């Protein structure tokens, strides 16, 4: 949405992660398109689905997988949430929440925060944790839904919310841990 274009470094980080773990010999392409901002400052998942339906241009076709990120100009109804995966190839990044919590003095950088949320949500689309990619070893944090039990893993539950902010102040974008990588490999990854 206008005013909330993706951070170029964050997109590059996502593309590198995908090239590292996915078997995509014909390559991975990122297409961006500006759409008009929403008049609502908070959006529900139902409203997000409607916006996607009105604006998405890339879909799965043949052996080419299409995956969609919507960057909103507002917050989720729960202001603690930075991003979400809500359909099998659909994710949302809450642009205002990301902007409000990164890039200023004393805050983590935009590239780090946005990169973490992009990579994490895409991990859910890839079936992590235990939502499509069967676990090779039990590593699900049962108290926090489909997330990894390793506090240092990208798929730890804090990466969806402002709970990650403290970690990112000193750390860098978390990586998938060995258990998450093993699940992706067993499901066709590399
Ligand atoms: Zn998550
Ligand atoms: Zn993990």
Image: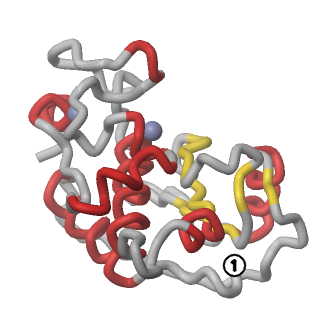
Residue 25, position as x, y percentages in the image? 17, 64
Point 68% across, 68% down: residue: 72
Residue 72 drawn above or below residue 120: below
Q: Which of the 4 image quadrants contains residue 119?
A: bottom left
Left or right of 163, for residue 174: left
Residue 1, position as x, y percentages in the image? 69, 78
Residue 31, position as x, y percentages in the image? 48, 79
Circle 1 crowding by C-alpha within 10 Å: few under 14, some 14–19, many from 20 = some
Tell me the element at label 1: loop
Given residues 85 and 111, the one toward you in this image is 111
Residue 8 drawn above or below residue 114: below
Q: Residue furthest front?
A: 106
Q: Find disc 1 in the rendering and name its residue.
A: 1
Given residues 19 and 75, the one toward you in this image is 75
Residue 41, position as x, y percentages in the image? 83, 65
Residue 55 drawn above or below residue 159: below
Point 71% across, 52% down: residue: 76
């Amino acid at each position: 949405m206008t005013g909330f274009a993706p951070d170029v470094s964050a997109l590059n980080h996502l593309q590198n992660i995908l090239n590292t773990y996915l078997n995509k010999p014909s390559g991975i392409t990122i297409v961006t398109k500006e759409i008009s901002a929403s008049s609502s400052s908070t959006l529900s998942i139902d409203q997000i689905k409607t916006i996607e339906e009105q604006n998405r241009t890339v879909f799965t076709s043949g052996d080419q997988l299409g995956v969609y990120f919507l960057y909103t100009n507002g917050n989720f109804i729960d202001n603690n949430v930075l991003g979400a995966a809500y359909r099998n190839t659909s994710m949302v990044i809450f642009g205002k929440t990301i902007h409000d919590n990164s890039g200023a003095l004393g805050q983590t950088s935009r590239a780090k925060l946005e990169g973490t949320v992009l990579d994490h949500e895409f991990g859910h689309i890839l079936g992590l944790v235990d939502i499509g990619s069967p676990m090779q070893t039990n590593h699900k944090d049962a108290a926090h839904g489909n997330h990894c039990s390793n506090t240092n893993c990208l798929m730890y539950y804090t990466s969806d919310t402002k709970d990650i902010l403290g970690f990112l102040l000193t750390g860098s974008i978390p990586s998938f841990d060995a258990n998450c990588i093993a699940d992706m490999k067993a499901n066709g990854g590399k």
